[in-house]
Image (tube, rainbow, N blue to C red):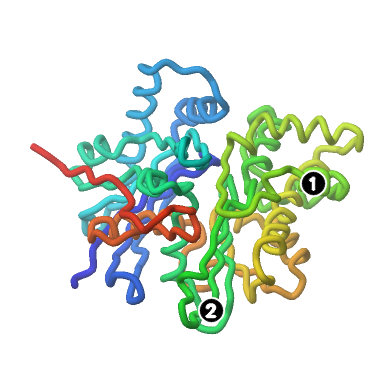
Amino acid sequence: MQPTRVIGLMSGTSVDGIDAALVEIAGKDSDLKVELIAGETYPYPPQLREQILEIGTGAAVSIADLAAIDDAIAHAFAKAAQLIQNGHQAATLIGSHGQTVYHRPYQGLGNLGYSLQLGRGALIAHLTRITTISNFRTGDIMAHGHGAPLVCKVDAYLLSHTQKKRCIQNIGGIGNVTYLPDQSDDWLSQIRGWDTGPGNSLLDLAVEHFTNGAKSYDENGNWAASGTPCYPLVEQWLSHEYFHLAPPKSTGRELFGVAYLHQCLQDSEVYELNTADFLATITELTAASIVHSYDTFLPKRPDQVILCGGGSRNTYLKDRLELLLGKVPVLTTDETGLSAVFKEAIAFAVLAYWRNLSIPGNLPAVTGASQEVLLGEIYGTYG
C-alpha cells in the first residue's frame, strides 16, 4: 500500500490557533507508520478568536451569527490546509477536528452526550478541493460514549513500548491522558484514558485577566515560576467532584472556564496572594490534578510520563510534574520521535486515514462506548 498524504487540523480549548500537520501515513494499526512532512500553527484572526471564546463561555448568539462563525472557522481551517502544503506534494485527505465550543458528557441512555465542533467539513472540502473528514466525536457519542478522549488508539499504535508502562499526557486547554500498558498479551484491552482536568485553560485565562488581555499565556511558565504555590488552596480545589469521578470521563471549558477561574480568584482572597503566587498555584493545580488522577485511577504509577500539547513547553509546569511524580521520568513525545506540539493534529490525520479505510477509531474501554465504531463524516468534492 502506497503512503497516503494527509493533513490533520486541530484547534483545542485554548483557542490559540490552528495546528496543521502534513503527514504521510502507511500501514493500518500495528504496522502504522507516520512521517511529519510539515507542521505549523496559524493564529485565528483576533476578532474570530474573541467570538469563539465568547461562545465557549455561554454568550448568547443567534443562529445566523453562529452559522457565520461556523463558516469563518471553516475558512480559517481551509486556509491553514492550503498554506501547510506550500512547497510540498499535495495531500489527498484532510482530517479536521474543528473547534469545540461545547461539550456535554454522556449522562445515561435517556440523554446521550453532546459535543459541538465548529468549522464544517463540507465547506473545508469545497474550499480546498480535498476530501475532508470531520465530526469525529459523533460516532462514539451515538454508541453511548463520551466522544473523548479520541486519540488513545493513535497513541497506542505510535507510542506504546514493549516493556514500559506509559502515560501519554496531553496538556492543551484541558489535560487528557492515555495509559498504555506494556505490550503483553491482550494489552489493547487494558488501555485507559480520560480528561484529567484543566491543562492550560485556567492559566491562560488568568494571564489574560491579570494583563487585561495584553498577554494570553505564561511563556515557559516564567511568571508562575517567580511565585510560590499555595498548597492549602490546591488541596481545596482538588476536592472538586470532577477529580474524584471515575473514568470514563471528559470535561471542557464548560467546567474549567471563566466562571471557575473567578471562583478560584475568590477562594484565593483569604490568602492574599500576589499575581505570581496565584499563577504558581493555578499551575500547581494542573500538575497536582494529573498526578492525583494517576494515583487514584491507575493500579500504580507508570514507568514513564510523556508530555505533548502546548503545555509540554511550559518548563515550570514540567518541573512541578517531575517533582510530584518522584522517580517517574517526565519526557516529551519529541524524545520518542513524534512532535509534541503537533501530536494532536497528527492524531486527527490518522483518524481520518482510518475512517477512509473503514477502520474503527475509538477505544470503548476509554470512552465508555458500547462498541468500536467508525469516527468521522466524509465530505467529498463536487463540480
Q: From the top left corner, tell me how far across and down residue 108 is, in percent.
A: 50, 41
- Work out whether mark 1 precedes mark 2 in sequence or the reverse, and give the earlier one: 2
Depth check: give the residue in front, 241 or 157: 241
Q: Residue 252 in the image: x percent, y percent? A: 57, 40
Residue 72: percent from left, percent from top: 35, 29
Q: Is residue 170 above or below residue 120?
A: below
User: Which residue type does callout 2 highlight?
Assistant: Asp
Residue sitting at x 65%, y 36%: 205
Query: Mark 1 packing: few (<14 Cα in 10 Å), some, or many (20+)?
Result: many
Which residue bears the numbered disc 2? 182
- Quarter holding the C terminus is top left
Give the answer, above or below, for where 46 lies relative to 285: above
Which is more foreground, mark 1 or mark 2? Answer: 2
The one nearer the camera, 57 or 15, is 57
Q: Around disc 2, counting alpha carbons within 10 Å, would you say few (fewer than 14), some (14 to 19), or many (20 or more)?
A: some
Q: Quadrant of residue 275?
A: top right
What residue sits 64% from the left and 72% below the top?
Answer: 302
Task: Quadrant for residue 278, please give it.
Answer: top right
Q: Residue at x 39, y 41 (%)?
A: 98
> What residue is shown at x 24% (from left), y 46% (from top)?
378
Three-letter amino acid code at the position of disc 1: Thr
Task: Answer with left or right where residue 44 lies relative to residue 213.
Answer: left
Name the quadrant of the N terminus.
Answer: bottom left
Tell me the CA gap for discs 1 and 2: 34 Å
Q: Position of residue 8 (x, y in %)?
A: 35, 53
Please identify the residue farthest to the left as the structure is shown: 383
Mark 1 lies on a secondary structure that is helix
- On the image, numbered disc 1 is attached to which residue? 281
Residue 325 located left or right of residue 277: left
Q: Secondary structure at mark 2?
A: loop
Residue furthest front in the image: 110
